[in-house]
Amino acid sequence: MAGKSKKTFEQWMQKGKQSMAHEDFEQAARAFSQAIKLKPEEAEGHYGRSHAYFEMGEFDRALCDLDRTLALDPGHAYAYLDRGSIRFAQRNLEAAFKDFDQAVKLAPLETEALVDRGMVRSLLGELEPAVQDYNRALELNTDFTRVYFYRGEAYLDLGKPDLAMKDFDRAIELHPEYADAYCSRAEIHAARDNFSRALRDLENSLKANPQYPDAYLLRGQIHLSTLQPDLALEDLNRALELNPDLALAYFYRASALMAKGKSEQALNDLDRAIAMEPEQGVCYLVRGLVYEMRGDSRKAEADWKKALELEPELKGISPAEFLRTSHLKLIK
């Protein structure tokens, strides 16, 4: 009886790719491992297995395979791109930037590499270079929807809301259910006191994504600015149900609770906001006001002192007046 024929490297690679297409990632990893046994110095075997490990959530093993891929093939642009994506997800921004930068150098027409490098640059505060990356990506693909959103966010951070508005408009034109773009455009409308337009955009944002905490947060801020604390509390409670780590929601909910005369609950929320974001001077400023309302002048003075240490520009501002006028102009 004839022996069973052995698969070749190419056949194992094909088996791995087929398993990936069928989302059988464990089988794919096994197939790529068999290919690697046959040709351990072939980069594509390691690269293929890195995809399987990535989909399985085994990021360290994926990184090892990508490192090996690049050791065997230093010109593998997509291995740099994939390694950068894992490092980005791990918040290792400096390392991610180096990988994306190398991917762009090796594949200058690859829009994804430009976009990813732009995203890292934005997070590192390099906003103008980020915009340049987004511009180049849009030159290569004028209908790359999310790049308009990313560039709009960069323009917002650069203090260029008119340019940001144009990009959000274009993103929504290309993708009418783009929840993030509606929410960011609503932010611009709200900052201009055009609350009706802001609320319409937030309605569309939540229609597209009913589980979007940032939209509830912004709508809660608007309700505070229009002196509707009950509606604000509904939205801020919902934001915190969806994302209990949203420090700003605790801050604004404390403001709404103060408007309702619930100083103890407001104090609890401000304590949580400060524990999560201890460098935000405005949180101490408002907590000091709560302490003053509760008759604890010593703690109030200590908080106001801390607020000025963190944000000297708050000097001369009445905490009560600040609370009344700053619901949409605090911290993002």
Image (cartoon, grey):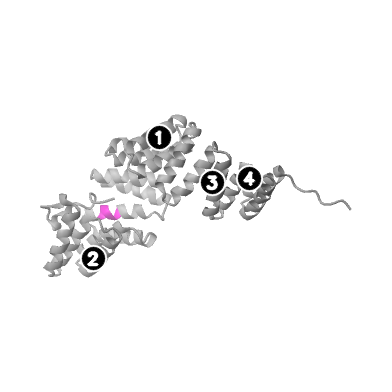
The foreground one among 170 and 59 is 59
Residue under pointer 2? 266
What amino acid is labelled 1 in the image?
Answer: Asp
* Label 2 vs 3, first from the N-terminus: 3
Residue under pointer 1? 133
Measured as percent of width and height from the top left, residue 22 is found at 64, 50
* Label 1 vs 2, first from the N-terminus: 1
| Mark nearer the viewer, 3 or 4 | 3
> Which residue corresponds to the image point at 58% horizontal and 41% vertical from the top-left?
72
What amino acid is labelled 3 in the image?
Answer: Asp
* Label 4 vs 2, first from the N-terminus: 4
Q: Is residue 287 visible?
A: yes
| Mark nearer the viewer, 1 or 2 | 1
* Label 3 vs 1, first from the N-terminus: 3
Read off the magenta span: 219-223
Measured as percent of width and height from the top left, residue 145 is found at 44, 38
133 magenta-colored: no
What amino acid is labelled 2 in the image?
Answer: Ala
Residue under pointer 4? 45
Disc 3 packing (10 Å; few <14; some 14–19; many ≥20) = some
Q: Secondary structure at mark 2?
A: helix
| Mark nearer the viewer, 4 or 2 | 4
* Label 4 vs 1, first from the N-terminus: 4
- Contact (CB < 8 A) between labels 2 and 3? no
* Image disc number at residue 67: 3
